[in-house]
Amino acid sequence: MANNRKSDSYKKNNLKALIVFSQEPAPNIALYDIQKKEQILEFLNKRIKPKSNDPDEKWITTWNDYLGRLKFFFRWLYNYKIKKDEAIILIWFRLPIYFVRNNINKVDVPLHQVQEC
């Protein structure tokens, strides 16, 4: 989020929303562990107020604001995790090829022994 030309207040409000969200379900659950939309909807539905308390239904704006900020964050987290996993996979597959190439070049086998086989 640091390099996407967003304003400081936008970044600050995103962080505030994430802090509130991370503390509410259970403080000991990591954001990586949230896998179901029901966990997010449970948090969002706590923001719904009855018509008697909120006749103008301003809670809808709050609900949608949290939804947008959480969607943005979880998309970023998902993409970050995929890129991280792909980097690990690429490293994993490239290492053996690198070692095989280097080992083939270092084998000292005279040409006449290779032709006899």
Image: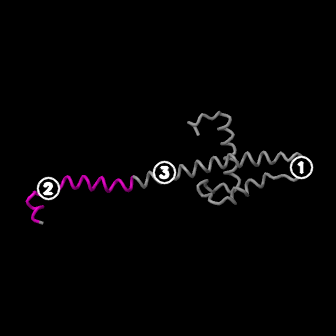
Q: In which quarter of the image is residue 41?
A: bottom right
Label of residue 36 in the image: none
**Horizontal arrangement in the rendering, residue 62 relative to residue 92 (left or right):** right
The residue stretch that appears in magenta: 91-116
Name the one closer to the observer, 26 or 92: 92
Residue type, numbered disc 2: Asp
Image quarter of the C terminus: bottom left
Question: How many callouts does the rendering have?
Answer: 3
Please tell me whether the stretch drawn in magenta is mainly helix, strand or loop.
Answer: helix
Q: Distance between the residues labelled 3 and 2?
A: 39 Å
In x, y percent, where is residue 112? 8, 59
Label of residue 53 in the image: 1
Name the one closer to the observer, 15 or 26: 15
Label 1's element?
Answer: loop
In x, y percent, where is residue 32? 58, 55
* Residue drawn 42% across the image and 55% down it: 89
Residue type, numbered disc 3: Lys
Residue type, numbered disc 1: Asn
Label whose residue precedes the other's in the sequence (1 or 3): 1
Label of residue 84 in the image: 3
Label whose residue precedes the other's in the sequence (3 or 2): 3
**Horizontal arrangement in the rendering, residue 53 relative to residue 36 (left or right):** right
Label of residue 108 in the image: 2
